[in-house]
Amino acid sequence: MTICIALILSAVNALTLSPALCSLIMKRVEKQPKWFVAFNSGFEKGHCSLWQSSHGCSS
Protein backbone atom coordinates (compact mmCIF):
# COMPACT_ATOMS: atom_id res chain seq x y z
CA MET A 1 0.00 0.00 0.00
CA THR A 2 2.78 2.43 0.90
CA ILE A 3 4.61 1.75 -2.36
CA CYS A 4 1.42 2.42 -4.35
CA ILE A 5 0.90 5.79 -2.66
CA ALA A 6 4.55 6.73 -3.18
CA LEU A 7 4.28 5.76 -6.84
CA ILE A 8 1.16 7.88 -7.34
CA LEU A 9 2.72 10.90 -5.62
CA SER A 10 5.86 10.52 -7.66
CA ALA A 11 3.89 10.31 -10.90
CA VAL A 12 1.86 13.42 -10.03
CA ASN A 13 5.04 15.30 -9.23
CA ALA A 14 6.83 14.19 -12.39
CA LEU A 15 3.92 14.94 -14.71
CA THR A 16 2.58 18.19 -13.24
CA LEU A 17 4.61 19.95 -10.58
CA SER A 18 8.12 19.60 -12.01
CA PRO A 19 7.32 20.89 -15.53
CA ALA A 20 5.32 23.79 -14.07
CA LEU A 21 8.20 24.77 -11.79
CA CYS A 22 10.70 24.50 -14.64
CA SER A 23 8.60 26.77 -16.82
CA LEU A 24 8.63 29.39 -14.08
CA ILE A 25 12.36 29.12 -13.43
CA MET A 26 13.55 28.86 -17.03
CA LYS A 27 11.89 31.88 -18.60
CA ARG A 28 13.43 32.92 -21.89
CA VAL A 29 15.29 36.21 -21.72
CA GLU A 30 16.21 38.37 -24.69
CA LYS A 31 19.78 39.13 -23.62
CA GLN A 32 21.62 36.22 -22.05
CA PRO A 33 24.67 36.60 -19.79
CA LYS A 34 28.05 36.10 -21.43
CA TRP A 35 28.91 33.07 -19.31
CA PHE A 36 25.63 31.43 -20.36
CA VAL A 37 26.32 31.97 -24.06
CA ALA A 38 29.88 30.64 -23.64
CA PHE A 39 28.68 27.57 -21.75
CA ASN A 40 26.03 26.77 -24.35
CA SER A 41 28.53 27.20 -27.16
CA GLY A 42 31.03 24.85 -25.51
CA PHE A 43 28.33 22.34 -24.66
CA GLU A 44 27.03 22.36 -28.22
CA LYS A 45 30.54 21.78 -29.62
CA GLY A 46 31.14 18.87 -27.25
CA HIS A 47 27.71 17.40 -27.86
CA CYS A 48 28.02 17.64 -31.63
CA SER A 49 31.49 16.11 -31.67
CA LEU A 50 30.14 13.05 -29.83
CA TRP A 51 26.78 12.69 -31.58
CA GLN A 52 27.34 14.27 -34.99
CA SER A 53 26.35 11.33 -37.17
CA SER A 54 23.20 10.29 -35.36
CA HIS A 55 21.78 13.66 -34.25
CA GLY A 56 22.44 15.78 -37.32
CA CYS A 57 24.61 18.50 -35.78
CA SER A 58 25.95 20.95 -38.30
CA SER A 59 29.65 21.63 -37.95
Image (cartoon, grey):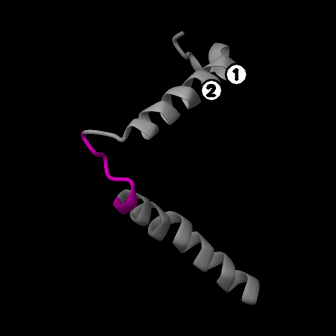
Q: Position of residue 4 (x, y in %)?
A: 70, 82
**Residue numbers of the magenta segment:** 24-30
Q: Position of residue 44 (x, y in %)?
A: 55, 26
Looking at the picture, does residue 59 appear above or below residue 40?
above
Please state which of residues 2 and 25 is positioned toward the viewer in this rendering.
25
Q: In 3D space, how far apart are the residues under numbered discs 2 and 1 (Cα atoms)?
A: 5 Å
Side (left or right) of 53 relative to 13: right
Side (left or right) of 22 relative to 6: left
Q: Hey, what amino acid is under mark 1?
A: Leu
Q: Position of residue 31 (x, y in %)?
A: 27, 39
Residue bearing the label numbered 1: 50
Mark 2 near mark 1, Cβ–Cβ under 8 Å?
A: yes
Mark drawn on residue 32 = none
Residue placed at 59% from the left, 79% from the top?
Answer: 9
Question: Label 1 neighbourhood size at 10 Å, few (<14), some (14-19), many (20+)?
Answer: few
Q: Hey, what amino acid is under mark 2?
A: His
Q: Position of residue 25 (x, y in %)?
A: 39, 60
Mark drawn on residue 47 = 2
Image quadrant occupied by the N terminus: bottom right
